[in-house]
Image (cartoon, grey):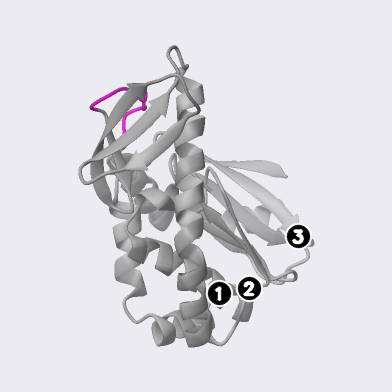
């Protein structure tokens, strides 16, 4: 990777065995990345990025204006989200193993006395991981039938700049753990997005055509996902 400076914008350049230039602006800070064919020179990349500056600045402004969650301390009466719904955290100290229980209006977290913040974060993330893994199989099966393509494997991990990603060769999909906090339809949008990438690698006209065929309101769901409060730690599109 190398970097190109254009005005006050730093562009991370990754050269790969590809045919076209691909530009992306990533949340939460609006980092600019471009994937380039091996033989394209820096000056050609600079001209390409310069032509896209108005779009880049719009995307960066959108990320800056996005509401952000406060850093979580995992204390009682703190707000936490689960599949788009807001709950109050209820921390209960007890002499036993950690446990998280979802109730009507609260998320009850049982921890030993003196459990540190980072340990509580780990406990909560493992609960989120367990819960999102319960719903993905059924949703994945639903959309595999609609799209006519199947993923051989899927995994969940906490990512910093993407909601989902896929290995096209291995047909493996990764989902961001943060999706456990967002409405289920946002998770479905990411499922469809990554499945379509198994049919079309690039974000080109064919990709858009397939998305509109399988999920006509996908742009609405994408906007909803990007409009929701961003997680404090950020994430990996």
Mark 3 or 2: in front is 2
Report the side of 127 relative to 152 (left or right).
Answer: left
On screen, 224 above or below 208? above
Q: Which quadrant of the figure has residue 34?
A: bottom right
How far from the left and from the top, in percent, is residue 208?
Answer: 46, 79
Q: Secondary structure at mark 2?
A: loop
Q: Looking at the image, is mark 3 or mark 1 earlier in the sequence?
A: 3
- Name the one closer to the observer, 93 or 46: 93
**Residue 210 pos. (x, y %):** 48, 84
* Residue at the top extreme, as displayed: 114
Between 4 and 228, the one nearer to me in the picture: 228
Give the mark nearer the N terminus: 3 vs 2. Answer: 3
From which residue to which does the magenta span run? 69-77
Q: Residue at x 38, y 52 (%)?
A: 59
For label 2, the residue is 151
The answer to whether the residue labelled 3 contacts the one labelled 2, judged by CB atoms less than 8 Å apart, is: no
Give yes or no for contact between labels 2 and 1 (Cβ–Cβ under 8 Å): yes
- Give the distance between the C-alpha atoms of the residues marked 3 and 1, in whole angstroms: 23 Å
Q: Residues within 10 Å of mark 2 (few under 14, many from 20)?
A: some
Q: Is residue 150 visible?
A: yes
């Amino acid at each position: 990777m190398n970097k190109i400076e254009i005005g006050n914008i730093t562009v991370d350049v990754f050269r790969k065995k590809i045919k076209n230039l691909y530009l992306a602006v990533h949340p939460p800070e609006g980092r600019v990345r471009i994937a380039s064919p091996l033989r394209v020179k820096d000056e050609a990349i600079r001209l390409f990025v310069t032509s896209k500056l108005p779009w880049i600045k719009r995307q960066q402004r959108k990320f800056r204006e996005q509401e952000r969650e406060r850093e979580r301390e995992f204390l009682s009466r703190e707000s936490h989200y689960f599949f788009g719904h807001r709950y109050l955290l209820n921390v209960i100290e007890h002499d036993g193993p950690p446990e998280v229980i979802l109730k009507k209006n609260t998320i009850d977290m049982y921890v030993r006395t003196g459990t540190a913040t980072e340990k509580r974060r780990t406990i909560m993330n493992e609960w989120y991981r367990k819960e999102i893994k319960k719903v993905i199989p059924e949703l994945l099966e639903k959309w595999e039938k609609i799209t006519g393509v199947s993923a051989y494997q899927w995994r969940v991990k906490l990512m910093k700049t993407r909601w989902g990603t896929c290995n096209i060769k291995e047909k493996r999909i990764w989902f961001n753990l943060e999706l456990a906090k967002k409405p289920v339809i946002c998770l479905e949008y990411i499922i469809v997005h990554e499945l379509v990438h198994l049919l079309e690698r690039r974000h080109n006209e064919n990709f858009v055509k397939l998305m509109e065929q399988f999920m006509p309101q996908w742009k609405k769901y994408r906007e909803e996902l990007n409009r929701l409060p961003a997680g404090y730690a950020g994430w990996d599109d």
